[in-house]
Image (tube, rainbow, N blue to C red):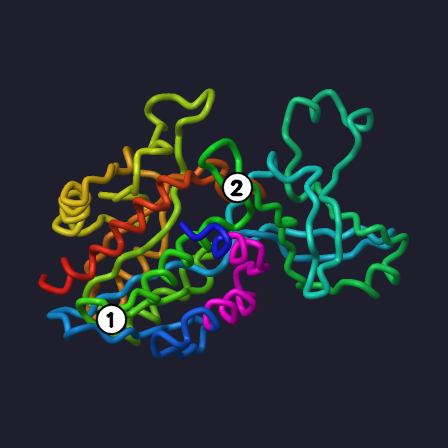
Amino acid sequence: MNKQLIKELSDLAGVSGKEELVREYILNQVKDYCECRTDNLGNLICFKKGDKAPKNTMMFSAHMDEVGFIVTNITESGLLQFTNIGGIDSRVVVGRCVLVGENKVRGIIATKAIHMVSEKEIDSPAKLKDLYIDIGACSREEALEAVSLADRVTFVPDFQEIGTDFIKNKALDDRAGCALLIDMIKTENLPYDTWFVFTTNEETGQAGAGPAAFAIGADIGVIVETTTAGDVSGASEDKYVCHMGGGPVVSFMDKGTIYDHELYKLGFDTAKELGIPCQTKRGVFGGNESRAVQAAGKGVRVMAVSMPARYIHSASCMLKGEDIKNTYKLLAALPAKLGDL
């Protein structure tokens, strides 16, 4: 596991629609190992020549964008009003430090002090529409000297190693997936020609992945992701989904996709051959860009390989090093398997 690569990727600002810093970083990492181009939606599309051409065109994808916020208004007192980009729980944002716009203006997401709320409000979490960002400005005019409407807002990065084998930071969904694809591209030899796509706008409707899959003419798509681990205090057994340390998660269905059953089985068979743990996503929850890839062009057979993550879509997403390593082992073995299908 390349912790430094994951750190540098997840530290970058790349809220949906503004992924260029992430794309530039990835391009600099892979340009000497494959052919690269950027499409109209900002997807970075890479082709790595293998030992031979596969029977079916295969594509591995991971999304570059992260959840965040966008400035929608600036009050006369200089406070920033905002809305979310992607699914963010208001309970995880109050008091968080953020960076606003390309100038990385520091701010704090805040709300009324406890002694200013009503009895009714005190028992309910603050809604995003009632929060604001304080950048230390005393007027609208002063704020406008530093920020603008439509500026993207990200959590302040704070990469840390936790315990003996965990890492945490913002945007590990899905910069950790991007890191694994970078490592695959840097592999000296691939058994088959393989496409790698670093996609945009996944958190806001999967707009990037479908057109990329269509342009490539993909027959098989492997979506590399993170997914919510349910092994936390207070979670009921039926919401357990997956657990940390259980290895890569291969899904059979989520709220957007029914996955190709042969590919689903192939994931587990390959993990067994490698002697690594592998788990399925228990229950039908969430979704990812698989549904956009699946519906592209003439239709694409898809599988999702995810890393179990805690506290996803927050400033402190957490992954286990062992899961990252085993997910990479599974992914690295798949081109040889998929090229013969």
Range covered by the magenta-colored residues: 7-27
Q: Is residue 188 left or right of residue 198?
A: left
- Mark 2 residue type: Lys
**Dot placed on the residue nearer the N-terminal end, 2 or 1:** 2
On the image, the x and y values in percent for residue 142 come to: 88, 60
In this rendering, is residue 64 above or below 81? Answer: below
Q: Label 1, secondary structure: give it.
A: loop
Residue 8 is inside the magenta segment: yes
The reply, left or right, for residue 323 in relation to residue 268 is: right
Seen in the picture, residue 257 relative to 26 is either above or below; the reply is: above
- Left or right of 140, for residue 310: left
Instruction: State the separation of the CA atoms marked 2 and 1.
Output: 37 Å
Which residue is depicted at the point 70% across and 57% down? 100
Q: Nearer the viewer, mark 2 or mark 1?
A: 2
Quadrant housing residue 326: top left
Q: Residue at 39% x, 46% y: name it.
A: 226
What is the x, y in percent for residue 334? 20, 56
